[in-house]
Amino acid sequence: MLADSTGSFPKLKGGYQTICNEVVCFISFVCDLVKIVSMKYLSLFLLLNFLALSSMQTIADEIYCQWTLRQDDVRLYIDKPLCGIEGRAEAGRQLVKQRENTNCLACHRMPIPEEDFHGEIGPPLHGVGNRYTKAELRVRLVDEKLVNPDTIMPGFYRQPDHNHRLLGKYFGKTLLTAQQVEDILAYLVTLKDDRL
Ligand code: HEC
């Protein structure tokens, strides 16, 4: 049965109209009830999903391992791998190429010929594995400000509470994870050739 432009149903003879209206009313009431109940479950389902995801995120972000800075004369170093993690050089090479998060190539020339546009703000990293030990490179990646307070190089693994000036998703977090820092270090120590 079709409603006319005023939204009411065409007149039927006698009491049929009321019966019809009641039937339609009842059906739409049942439909609404089903809708309400399913929306409730849907929103509960979405809420639970969201909570599960956000708690996973928190756990992943919370794995910050404190590091200890050491010094021999003027040599600064962090000898223990972050969180005791073993780095993978090939993963590190992929990471330094990224234009988000690391963006090393914005400031450094590196022996990565497949990438265009290497920066000149920092020193070229060719042969950096000859100039520094892994423990010394760790300081530079964790927080170059410990070496040079005026540097513009970001501290990739500063203590999260020291990062309160960072906005958005980095608020109170490190820029890179311990695994990423260790991967990059594993790659940097392979750079033994000074030639540009
Ligand atoms: C915004 C620019 C910038 C970015 C991004 C940057 N650096 Fe640097 N980096 C510098 C500058 C400038 C120096 C020179 C030292 C200083 O300023 O204290 C430096 C120094 C270094 C050094 C010491 C080199 C030496 O010969 O003394 C290493 C190693 C290094 N950076 C690695 C990296 C890696 C790896 C990345 C990416 C994860 C990176 N940097 C990202 C600017 C940057």
Image: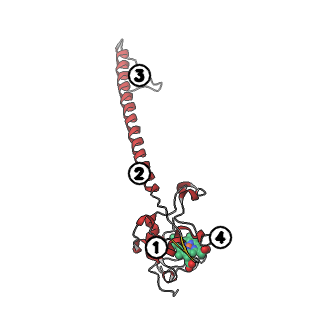
Pointer 2 with pointer 3, Cβ within 8 A: no
Return the mark for residue 56.
Answer: 2
In primary-sequence order, the first of circles 1 and 4 is 4
x and y, in percent, of residue 160 in the image: 54, 58
Dot 2 surroundings within 10 Å: few (below 14), some, or many (20 or more)? few
Which residue type does callout 1 highlight?
Answer: Leu
x and y, in percent, of residue 106 in the image: 56, 72
How far separated are the C-alphas under marks 2 and 3? 54 Å
Pointer 2 with pointer 4, Cβ within 8 A: no
Q: Please identify, in this view, whether the residue under mark 2 or under mark 1 is nearer the observer.
A: 1
In primary-sequence order, the first of circles 2 and 1 is 2
Whether residue 104 is visible here, answered yes or no, is no
How far separated are the C-alphas under marks 1 and 4? 23 Å
Give the answer, above or below, for where 86 lies relative to 190.
Answer: above
In primary-sequence order, the first of circles 3 and 4 is 3
For mark 4, give the secondary structure. Answer: loop
Whether residue 5 is visible here, answered yes or no, is yes
Dot 4 surroundings within 10 Å: few (below 14), some, or many (20 or more)? few
Q: Specify whether 170 is left or right of 89.
A: right
In primary-sequence order, the first of circles 2 and 3 is 3
- Mark 1: C-beta under 8 Å from nearest atom of ligand 1: no
**Residue depicted at x 38% and y 32%:** 35
Which residue type does callout 2 highlight?
Answer: Met
Where is mark 1, residue-wise? Answer: 185
Q: Nearer the viewer, residue 125 or 13?
A: 125
x and y, in percent, of residue 97 in the image: 48, 72
Extreme-bottom residue of the structure: 195
Where is mark 3, residue-wise? Answer: 9
For mark 1, give the secondary structure. Answer: helix
How far separated are the C-alphas under marks 2 and 4? 36 Å
